[in-house]
Image: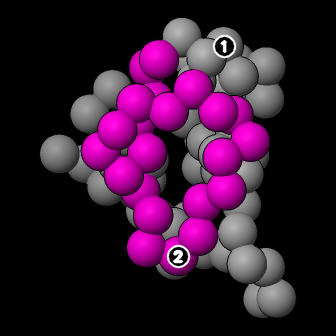
Amino acid sequence: MKTEKIELLPGEEYIRLDNALKSAGFFATGGQAKIEIQSGHVKVNGEICLQRGKKLRPGDTAEVDGVILEVF
């Protein structure tokens, strides 16, 4: 399984799921991320997540089509 990493900016506690997926290049727009999340195609920490505003903190993972995004 392929793993991508995204680093929080200094002073940030979290990043929203939709923003993380867009920033990491999983989707071209926030609208695409929203549709995929709400369609049940995204897992957070191994479980399907339907909340596009889910807060990802260091150590959390998101998965789309077998590619894992790790937040640090």
Residue 60 magenta-highlighted:
yes
* Spatial CA span between label 1 and label 2: 24 Å
Q: Is residue 23 visible?
A: no
Q: Is residue 47 left or right of residue 2?
A: right
Task: Specify the amino acid type for callout 2.
Answer: Pro
Up-down: is 3 above or below 13? above
Residue 20 magenta-highlighted:
no
Q: What element carries label 1?
A: helix
Task: Specify the amino acid type for callout 1.
Answer: Ile
Residue 29 in the image: state x and y as whole percent: 77, 26
Q: What's the residue at 33%, 26% (across, down)?
A: 65
Q: Which residue lies furthest to the left in this view?
A: 1
Up-down: is 9 above or below 31? below
Q: Is mark 2 on a helix, strand or loop?
A: loop
Q: Identify the mark at residue 53; answer none if there is no mark.
A: none
Disc 2 designates what residue?
A: 58
Disc 1 designates what residue?
A: 35
> Of label 1 and label 2, which has the lower sequence position?
1
Q: What's the residue at 44%, 20% (across, down)?
A: 41
Write down the region rendered in magenta.
40-61
Q: Residue furthest bottom?
A: 10
Quadrant position of the N terminus in the picture:
top left
